């Protein structure tokens, strides 16, 4: 911690001093709060010796940890989850200061962390059990799932606990040690994980929170110090991970971008679709890899859908995320918000209609992270707002004539993370889902990760898998045991 109570340390470096401190980025990592643009937290970068010690300690600790039973590992991980949940009163405002999410929703991230962690702990015994083929006289045969060694988790700022827990808890449950490098915007999250594991009594050396630059991150991977990389971030970031791992022959899990579509069929429950898709588009200020960024609505429902969508969007309250009344906080920084503004402006110049009067959202101001939500119609796939990831509070809505046109438009994207279908006909949804190129297809819901299901993407949305029993396959390697026990066989 910075030595100040949550929300207070931003005042330590203001004005000229804050500007000077920002120039120290070659030695430190800084979190600049989107709430007011001031320095919220700062940490020194790990030294080469720090990194080397962490890797040695992790390697040594993992050798003993892998021999502990799955039940024993689960006891440690469960205590760590309990400890993190016990920090809620501190974590919720910290999240608001670090990345701008309103405190009204901060507990939701911890609830999601708990759901995912406890599920992955509960299924570990079954997921990691030996695979025994049909009996063969005279032989003992089975496939064991062995840990990889050291798993390197590189986590983003937008859902800083949820994205990290997807690999941290399962990696430990699978018998691995974990190194965590968290985003500079959410520096304190890594420390909270470390505190949780310390409170749980996790054996020393098994978990390390490292403050690293991009260069140090690449060197840690390219130097052969880790046995797997779990990265969540941008498409260019994923490419950098692959480049760093060239020649290391280690698995790399990549959860990258999204331009997730929704299709509202003519038989959809209109009110349910409107309510859930507004939330799916604008929750977390649209800063979600699986947020809804484009919507295709059957022409019979189009006008009513747009009318209801716009009306509900106007009820958002853009403001200070530490205010309980705020339902839409700032984006992560002014540059990200201005990128979305540029997409909106370009679409309008190309003929799109913007339905939200941004002046009614008092905090909205160019150059700041505070951006009003926007709903666009009259859009097409020639526009960047319908093709490129926005990662902000804007959504384009198009009218379609039916399933065939909707499927073609949903698949007209380099991304393939999730898609949602809004209909009362499950058979129709299943038929459409089978033709949509994404890792997850929803019916009558969106923007949610079920830990019992595989979380994965295709194309520019990445590769690999987290969560579910399948997720454990990516954190272990199979080892076959083929024993001939009857020499007469």
Image: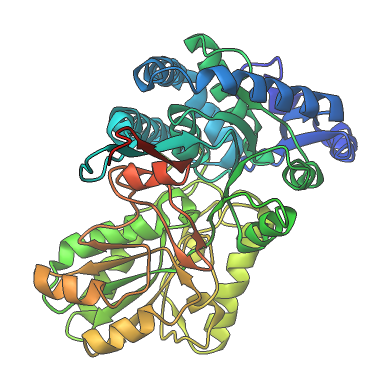
* Residue appearing at x 46%, y 46% in the figure: 474
Measuring from the top left, give residue 15's x and y in whole percent: 83, 35
The image shows residue 53, relative to residue 301, as above or below, that is above
Based on the displayed image, in which of its 4 quarters is residue 483 positioned?
top left
182 above or below 383?
above
Can I make out residue 324 in this image? Answer: no
**Residue positioned 58% across, 77% down in the render:** 345
Quarter of the C terminus within the rendering: top left
Task: From the viewer's side, name the closer residue of 374 and 178.
Answer: 178
Residue in front for this viewpoint, 6 or 296: 296
Residue 267 in picture, x, y percent from top left? 11, 75
Nearer the observer, 316 or 380: 380
Q: 310 left or right of 331?
A: left
Which colour assignment does the render follow? rainbow
Quadrant where the image shows the N terminus: top right
Q: Residue 185: give x, y in percent of width and height.
A: 65, 40
Residue 401: % across, % down: 23, 90
Q: How many numbered marks, from 0 up?
A: 0
Q: Is residue 67 visible?
A: yes
421 horizontally vs 222: left or right: left
Which residue is at the front of the view, 99 or 48?
48
Q: Is residue 265 above or below residue 51?
A: below
Q: Quadrant of residue 408?
A: bottom left
Q: Residue furthest front?
A: 488
């Amino acid at each position: 911690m910075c030595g100040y109570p949550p929300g207070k340390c931003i005042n330590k470096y203001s004005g000229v001093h804050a500007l000077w401190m920002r120039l120290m980025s070659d030695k430190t990592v800084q979190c600049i709060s989107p709430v007011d643009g001031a320095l919220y937290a700062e940490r020194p970068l790990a030294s080469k010796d720090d990194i080397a010690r962490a890797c040695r300690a992790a390697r040594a600790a993992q050798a003993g940890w892998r021999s502990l039973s799955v039940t024993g590992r689960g006891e440690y991980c469960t205590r760590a989850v309990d400890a993190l949940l016990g920090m809620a009163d501190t974590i919720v405002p910290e999240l608001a200061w670090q990345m701008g999410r309103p405190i009204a929703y901060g507990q939701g991230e911890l609830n999601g962390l708990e759901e995912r962690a406890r599920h992955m702990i509960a299924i570990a015994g079954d997921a990691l059990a030996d695979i025994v083929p049909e009996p063969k006289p005279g032989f003992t045969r089975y496939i064991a799932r062995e840990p990889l060694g050291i798993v390197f988790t590189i986590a983003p700022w937008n859902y800083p606990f949820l994205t990290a827990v997807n690999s941290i808890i399962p990696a430990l449950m699978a018998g691995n040690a974990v190194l965590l490098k968290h985003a500079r915007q959410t520096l304190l999250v890594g420390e909270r994980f470390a505190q949780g594991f310390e409170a749980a009594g996790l054996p020393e050396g098994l978990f390390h929170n490292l403050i690293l630059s991009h260069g140090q991150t690449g060197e840690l991977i390219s130097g052969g110090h880790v046995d797997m990389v779990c990265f969540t971030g941008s498409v260019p970031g994923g490419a950098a991970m692959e480049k760093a791992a060239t020649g290391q022959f280690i698995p790399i899990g990549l959860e990258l971008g999204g331009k997730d579509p929704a299709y509202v069929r003519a038989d959809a429950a209109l009110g349910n679709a409107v309510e859930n898709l507004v939330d799916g588009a604008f929750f977390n200020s649209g800063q979600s890899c699986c947020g809804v960024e484009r919507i295709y609505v059957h022409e019979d429902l189009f006008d009513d859908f747009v009318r209801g969508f716009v009306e509900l969007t106007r009820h958002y309250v853009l403001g200070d995320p530490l205010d309980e009344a705020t339902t839409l906080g700032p984006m992560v920084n002014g540059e990200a918000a201005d990128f979305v503004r540029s997409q909106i402006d370009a679409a309008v110049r190309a003929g799109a209609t913007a339905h939200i009067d941004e002046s009614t959202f008092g905090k909205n101001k160019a150059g700041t992270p505070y951006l009003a939500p926007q709903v666009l119609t009259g859009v097409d796939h020639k526009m960047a707002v319908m093709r490129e990831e926005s990662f902000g509070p804007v959504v384009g809505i198009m009218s379609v004539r039916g399933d065939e046109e909707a499927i073609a438009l949903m698949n007209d994207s380099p991304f393939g993370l999730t898609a949602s279908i809004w209909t009362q006909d499950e058979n129709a949804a299943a038929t459409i889902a089978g033709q949509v190129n994404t890792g997850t297809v929803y019916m009558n819901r969106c923007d949610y990760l079920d830990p019992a299901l595989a979380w994965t993407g295709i194309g520019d949305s990445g590769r690999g898998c987290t969560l579910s029993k399948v997720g454990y396959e990516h954190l272990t390697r199979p080892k076959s045991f083929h024993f001939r026990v009857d020499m007469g066989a």
